[in-house]
Amino acid sequence: MEAATVGAGTVGAGTVGAGLPANGAPETAEPPPKPPRWRRWAVEIAIFVAVFFAIQAWMARDVPAGPAPDFTTVAADGRALSLAEWRAAHPGEAVGVYFWADWCPICTAQQGTIDAVQSDYPVLTVAMQSGDAAAVAAVLAERGLDWTTAIDADGGIAQAYGLRGVPAFVVVDPAGEIRSVSLGYTTGWGLRARLWWAGVQI
C-alpha cells in the first residue's frame, strides 16, 4: 500500500511539471517587433502634409480659376494702379499678388519674408481693410517697407479673388492665369518655388 501511494505521488508530480522548461518558469511569447522609427515619422509627416493641403484647398475653394481678376485702385503713394499695369511692367514674368492687413499679426510675422521675395520676383501687395492711402503709407513707413501697395479699403479686391482672410499670396503666370494660392504663413522658399514654377510653365 505504501509503494502504491508513493507511485501515485510520482505520477502527480510529473503531471504538474508537464509543458514547463527545465527551470520550471512558464514560457512567454515575445512581443512583436516595433516598426522602425523613421517609418512612423514618415507616416506622421505624410498625414500632416495631407491635412495641410486639404485645409488650403478648402480655404481657397472660392478662388476663381483661370485669369486673375484685374483691378484698378489707388496705390499707397497716391497714384492710380492696376494689376494689368503691374503685369505690363514685368512682361514674361510670373508675378505675386500679396494680400495683407495692418491689423493681422501673421502678416506682420511674414513681412520680412515678403520683403526678401520681392527682391527676386515682382510682388504687388494689396492692403485689405487697412484704411486709405495715407494710412497705409504711414504703416509702410513705420515698418520700413518699400512695397508697391494697392489699397483695398473695403475688401472688394480680396472678395473678387474669393479670399476670406489674410495673409494670402496669389501667383499669376506670364499669361495672366492664376497658378496657385497660398493662405496663411508661407515660407520664402515655398513662395519662390511657386513663382519660379509659374514662370517656366508658359
Image: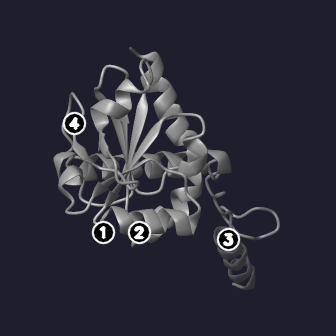
In percent of width and height, residue 158 lies at 24, 52
Q: Earlier in the sequence, mark 2 or mark 1?
A: 2
Dot 2 alpha-carbon crowd within 10 angstroms: few under 14, some 14 to 19, many 20 or more: some
Q: Which residue corresponds to the image point at 45% horizontal and 23% vertical from the top-left? A: 93
Q: Which residue corresponds to the image point at 41% horizontal and 54% vertical from the top-left? A: 77
Q: Of 195 and 26, which appears nearest the observer?
A: 195
Mark 3 to mark 4 CA distance (whole Å): 98 Å
**Nearer to us: label 4 or label 1:** 1
Residue picked out by circle 4: 70
Amino acid type of the residue that numbered disc 3 sits on in the rendered structure: Val
Residue picked out by circle 1: 131
Q: Earlier in the sequence, mark 1 or mark 3?
A: 3
Q: Earlier in the sequence, mark 4 or mark 1?
A: 4
**Nearer to us: label 1 or label 3:** 1
Residue picked out by circle 3: 11
Amino acid type of the residue that numbered disc 4 sits on in the rendered structure: Asp
Q: Which residue corresponds to the image point at 53% horizontal and 49% vertical from the top-left? A: 114
In percent of width and height, residue 143 lies at 56, 66
